[in-house]
Image (cartoon, grey):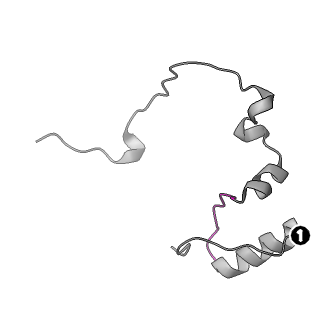
Amino acid sequence: MPKTLPPWKIKRKLIVKAEEETDPRYGHQPAERPIQDYIRFGVINLDKPAGPSSHEVTAWAKRLLSISHAGHGGTLEA
């Protein structure tokens, strides 16, 4: 039976099948997308740090983004 390596010891390489440009009429590259688009479409992917509760982080996001409605999906606690 072959030995299983831990994930951090596995050598990986990125395979790109095609390079394409995004037509600005149809959206943005994720790294260039303005925060207004994330808010408009309703999803922000957040990596919550250990310590504050999910409810606290949701309250911070509401205050920082000046929005009245926000929530989280599922349990975010470790």
Residue 52 coordinates in the image, percent (x, y): 67, 78
62 lies left or right of 46: right
Write the residue at 72% across / 74% down: 58
17 lies left or right of 56: left
The image quarter containing residue 44 is: bottom right
Q: Is residue 47 above or below residue 36?
A: below
Write the residue at 80% across / 30% down: 25
| Residue with the mark numbered 1 | 66
Q: Is residue 52 visible?
A: no
Residue 34 belongs to magenta span: no
Q: Amino acid at mark 1?
A: Ser
Write the residue at 24% across / 45% down: 4
Residue 51 belongs to magenta span: yes
Q: Residues within 10 Å of mark 1 (few under 14, many from 20)?
A: few
Write the residue at 83% across / 46% down: 34
**Residue farthest along the front direction in this orientation:** 25
* Secondary structure under the numbered disc 1 in the rendered image: loop
Considering depth in this image, is 63 or 12 the residue closer to the camera? 63
**Residue farthest along the right direction in this orientation:** 66
Residue 29 coordinates in the image, percent (x, y): 72, 35
Magenta region, residue range: 43-52
The image quarter containing residue 20 is: top right
**Residue farthest along the left direction in this orientation:** 1
Considering depth in this image, is 67 or 19 the residue closer to the camera? 67
Residue 35 coordinates in the image, percent (x, y): 82, 52
Identify the image quadrant of the N terminus.
top left
Residue 40 coordinates in the image, percent (x, y): 79, 56
68 lies left or right of 55: right
The dominant secondary structure in magenta is loop
Q: Is residue 59 above or below residue 11?
A: below
Q: Is residue 25 visible?
A: yes
